Image (tube, rainbow, N blue to C red):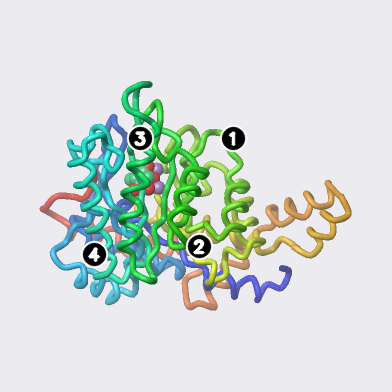
Amino acid sequence: MSDHSAVKAVLRTQHIETPSWAFGNSGTRFKVFAQEGIPRDAYEKIADAAVVHRYTGVAPSVAVHIPWDTVDDYADLAKHAENLGVKIGAVNPNVFQDDDYRLGSICNPDPAVRRKALEHLLDCVDIMDATGSRDLSIWLADGLNYPGQDSLADRQARLEEALAAVYERLGENQRMLLEYKFFEPAFYATDVPDWGTSYAHCVELGDKAQVLVDTGHHAPGTNIEFIVAFLLRKNRLGGFHFNSRFYADDDLMVGAADPYQLFRIMVEIVLGGGLDAASGVAFMLDQCHNIEPKIPALIRSVLNVQEATAKALLVDSEALRAAQRAGDVLGANGILVDAFSTDVRPLLAELREEMGLDPDPIAAYRRSGYAEQIVAERVGGTAAGWGA
Ligand code: RM4
Ligand code: MN
Ligand code: MN
């Protein structure tokens, strides 16, 4: 696409969802460094998410994680979000932080634990009903640390059974996104370790089951854009959890480690029609800002996704296809590299001005005084976080 106004028109429609948990304190298993001004509850996390949207204009929803974001009245939480100009996005069940889940959740050898985990997944669908959320984002920590610890095959059967029960419970416009991760916390075998396993379960379940690609959940060197192209072609790409990794599931800011990889992913999205509303691809962030201030880090992350998308939209797809057909290896590659090398910052600044936003969202946030305001206001109570 070489017409800049067409590129800008598409960029206006791309929505990037922030994760509520990224606004809370987080860390590694070694240390959680507490920050000041951290939200104490889901209401305050949503207020921070609304600020990210206010300055970027393209982050109008926030995912919740249950029980981290438990409230008495979910319809009220949804109303609070709406009053601030955002919506509640995906609901993420948490079936990994209870003592009962030592040997897994819905794959656990104990039927009582499996039932408890399933109940939680079903409760999360109730929350979706109350908040109007479309997506149930399932990530399971289930797996084994030692060979022989449990039957790999039986665990697949248990997984299948529980997922089918959740699928049954979904409303007409609700979806289940099944996330995979190759290791951690389990070190020997994970029950949903890769996109193929997720894909096979989704195909068996039905159209409302879709694969969720968390960019940090792959072995080094994995060609993620291939996975994206494959799933998109099969209408099974439910969405992304964007973040960056250098080594394992680092949860760093998307685009920080390898902007060229992010661009290549977005190229497949653009070429495969993944930006069309009908494709249903959800662009979500799943990050932890352990040492940097959270709100500007999330603004930066949203901008990084937007920048990669803008570059992908600039790929001259007609010339690319012609070069591919002609077997012009260097020509085809040059078209991608040209688009990646384009400085899209002026175009994005222009877009923001057209949207009534400050062309420099991070500077505008800094000037706003919000960071100082929350430090002054959020005194007392318990800061949100997983307190490892
Ligand atoms: C997992 C996975 C999930 C996220 C948790 C906190 O590694 O990425 O999506 O909910 O972390
Ligand atoms: Mn994730
Ligand atoms: Mn992760």
Query: Marks 1 and 2: which is nearer the front?
Result: 2
Answer left or right for 364 relative to 71.
Answer: right
The dot on residue 92 is none
Q: Residue furthest top?
A: 147
Answer left or right for 20 relative to 260.
Answer: left
The amino acid beneath tag 4 is: Asp
According to the image, label 2 marks what residue? 281
Provide residue 376's location: percent of width, then percent of height. Answer: 19, 58
The residue sitting at 84% across, 60% down in the picture is: 322
**Of residues 212 and 376, the one drawn nearer to the viewer in this rendering:** 212
First in sequence: mark 4 vs mark 2: 4
The residue sitting at 23% across, 37% down in the picture is: 101
Query: Marks 1 and 4: which is nearer the front?
Result: 4
First in sequence: mark 3 vs mark 4: 4
Residues at marks 4 and 2, CA–CA distance in whole angstroms? 23 Å
The dot on residue 126 is 4
Quarter of the view holding residue 176: bottom left
Q: Is residue 188 above or below residue 273?
A: above
The amino acid beneath tag 3 is: Asp
First in sequence: mark 1 vs mark 2: 1
According to the image, label 1 marks what residue? 221
According to the image, label 3 marks what residue? 154
Provide residue 61's location: percent of width, then percent of height. Answer: 37, 66
Residues at marks 3 and 4, CA–CA distance in whole angstroms? 29 Å
Q: Are marks 1 and 2 in contact (CB under 8 Å)?
A: no
Provide residue 169's location: percent of width, then percent of height. Answer: 30, 62
First in sequence: mark 1 vs mark 4: 4
First in sequence: mark 3 vs mark 2: 3
Q: Residue furthest left?
A: 380
Q: Residues within 10 Å of mark 1 (few under 14, many from 20)?
A: few
